[in-house]
Image: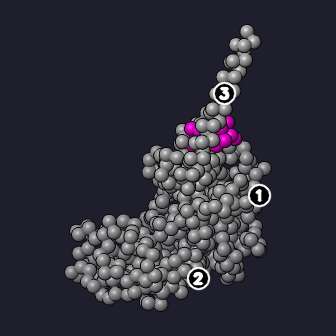
Amino acid sequence: MKKIIFLFSFLIFWSCDKKDDELSIAKKRAIENDTNYEVKDFIWKKMNAYYLWQANIENLADDRFEYSIDNTNATSANYVYFLKQFLSPKDLFKSLLYKNNDIYGDRFSFITDDYKSLENSFQGVSASTGLNFNLKLIRTNNRVVGIVNYVTPNSDAERKGVKRGDIFMKIDNVFLTPFNYQNLIYSKNQELTFSFYRMTSSGLEFSKNITIKQQEIHQNPIFIHKIIQRQGKKIGYLMYNSFITNYDDELNQVFLEFKNAGIDELILDLRYNSGGYVTSATRLASMISGVSSKNVFIQQQVNPKLEKLWGNTLLSYFTERTNTSPIHTLNFARANKKLYVITSNRTASASELIINNLKPYMNIVQIGDKTVGKNLASVTIYDSPSGNKENINKNHTWAMQPIVIRSANANGFGDYQAGISPDYQLEEDDSNMGVLGELSDPLLAKTIEVITGERLRTNITSRKAIQSVNFDYLDNSESHSPLYNRMFIDIPETK
């Protein structure tokens, strides 16, 4: 009997030793043959911990590889084999994303192999010509045109005289098409030659070539701020193009100007603002409203693991300070005043947060087009024990920006995945764009009409010129930026 027990025990230990040897060999070969193995390891573990839809992804399940999540990489050969099958970290990352449909699936998570460039873009620093434009498809010939929305101050495009409403059809003497425009527009060439055209009664005719340098630009999101006086009212106007924390103190000074001037109304123009930091959105909402910091601005839903880890940080409150100084607030919520917001089909994320999450406290009047519909926030996750940059793995520069939060306002409403519809529908007209910040801009003119009742006639260009060319919206210049349609948070401290 003792011999049988001994033999049985020997077989168990021999089996375990053999399994450990197999795993050790498998791990060694994986790491030797796959230079990105540790990147893949980082991706899986952090997606398992942080991803909003972790519970919905079979390959992110805690027991996917037979053993405790704490020991997965150390005890399961299956885990090693799973990571090895993906040719690149991006392939693994994409395979782990939640897929449903265009509205309810994950449209926004992404990964990068250069977190330094990502960090720069979050602070408004990037290589650019300075042109912001929409891309339209000409129905008759399947060619693509770029229509300039605005030009960044101090850019080479501004120095070369490019203006809002200018139209281009070629880059480096090649016509733009649906198949080549991305390669041409996002070329890394230091200079790009744009061929500009003008509208005539017979269609688009060549005007001139302009060569524009791509330079590192610091894009201040405070594009225009001014006070407009109409019908006895002082109307503050702010065109704000991105939520970038580096400029929050400057934004606070704008509100001090508005406050000292005693403005009666405020127009917040977010038509080109596709998102940014939740911190900046919270500060802007506080500058506008004056709601107490004891009140909830955002209710945040995360996966069950983070709910236990982050605890009370899932409630985000209004604030009374920027990084360096007290908030200068207009107190519009306390004064029962309305906020007028200009939107477009590019208004997203943190911009939508302002609209949806101020509604429990004040009346929002929206003019323009339906917004994108993004109630989700992401966080930058690095390869480190905590996910932030402390003790970061210096062997690579990969980082992830996965969706980790679904947001709602203080009343619990956050179901605007299909976009937020305006109270007054008005899309930008390619033939009548006007000047931003001036009454020739139809969207601004319409907003002032809503405020004052005064009907303003904008300068209308010849409709006959554009009738010969029919456009369909295709894309825009910002769609490949890490900031585009995104809302960011910093990793909260654990409770």
Residue farthest toward the top in the current orientation of the protein = 1
Callout 2 secondary element? strand
Classed neighbour count for the residue bearing mark 2: other residues with Cα under 10 Å, few (<14), some (14–19), many (≥20)? some
Residue type, mark 3 in image: Trp
- Could you tell me residue 49's position as x and y percent? 65, 47
Q: Is residue 199 found inside the magenta-colored segment of the image?
A: no
The residue shown at (70%, 51%) is 314
Give whichever of 281, 11 is nearer the camera.
Answer: 11
- Whole-percent x and y of residue 349? 55, 61
| Magenta-tinted stretch | 68-80
| Residue 113, numbered label | none
Q: Residues within 10 Å of mark 1 (few under 14, many from 20)?
A: few
Query: Mark 3 and mark 2: span between their CA atoms?
Result: 79 Å
User: Which label sits in the foreground, 3 or 2?
Assistant: 3
- Magenta stretch contains residue 69: yes
Question: What's the amino acid at mark 1?
Answer: Lys
Task: From the image, tell me which residue sits under label 3.
Answer: 14
Say what secondary structure mark 1 lies in: loop
Three-letter amino acid code of the residue under disc 2: Lys
- Please give left or right for residue 243 compared with residue 211 in the image: right
Q: Main secondary structure of the magenta part?
A: helix
Residue on which disc 2 sits: 226
Give the image location of residue 319, x and y in percent.
73, 64
268 displayed left or right of 389 = left
Q: 454 left or right of 69?
A: left
* Location of mark 1 (residue): 294
Image quadrant holding the N terminus, namely top right
Location of residue 166 by image quarter: bottom left
Q: Label 3: how many residues lie within 10 Å, few (<14), some (14-19) or many (20+)?
A: few
In-image side of 39 versus 178 (left or right): right
